[in-house]
Amino acid sequence: MAWTRRLFLAATFLLAILLGQAMTALEVIWILRLRMRPEEYVSERPGRAIREIVKLAEKMPLSFTWPLQCYC
């Protein structure tokens, strides 16, 4: 099993709790939250962009139906 940063910090948190180091455990939680904040922002950006594209598409007229346009 590969040790990721999140797994390492979780193991450190559990070890700190078991050893009675509550302040260290709180610091680990703080580091985890501080590290996850940019990840959440970056992963949220594409969803926001897709929502904006869908809003723009809803405003566009439906007369353009490429490539399914039929000239019958």
Image (tube, rainbow, N blue to C red):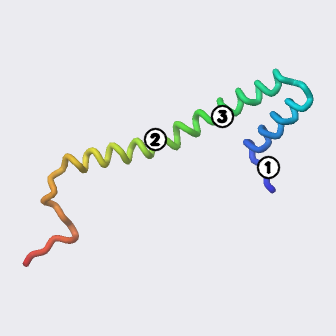
Residue 67: quarter of image:
bottom left
Q: Distance between the residues labelled 2 and 3?
A: 17 Å
**Could you tell me which residue is drawn at 82 percent across and 40 percent down?**
11
User: Looking at the image, which residue is at 66% across and 34% down?
Assistant: 35
Percent of width and height locating residue 47: 43, 45
Question: In which quadrant of the rendered view does residue 30 lie?
Answer: top right
* Mark 1 residue element: loop
Mark 3 element type: helix
Q: Residue 72 location in percent, x, y?
A: 7, 78
Quadrant of image for the N terminus: bottom right
Q: Where is residue 6 in the image (x, y as percent from the top left)?
A: 73, 42
First of labels 1, 2 by sequence position: 1
> Does residue 65 lie above or below 31 as drawn?
below
Q: How many marks?
A: 3
Q: In this view, does 11 lie above or below 34?
A: below
Q: Name the residue under label 1.
A: 3
- Relative to residue 50, is residue 62 depicted above or below? below
Q: Counting residues from the N terminus, which is met first, the one under dot 3 or under dot 1?
A: 1
Of labels 2 and 3, earlier in sequence is 3
Q: In this view, does 4 lie to the left or right of 16?
A: left
Q: Mark 2 points at which residue?
A: 45
Q: Viewer-proximal residue, 63 or 25? A: 25
User: Element under label 2?
Assistant: helix
- The amino acid type of the residue labelled 3 equals Arg
Kindly identify the amino acid type of the residue bearing the numbered disc 2. Arg
Q: Where is residue 26 in the image (x, y as percent from the top left)?
A: 76, 24
- The residue tagged 3 is 35
Label 1, label 2: how many angstroms apart (C-alpha)? 28 Å
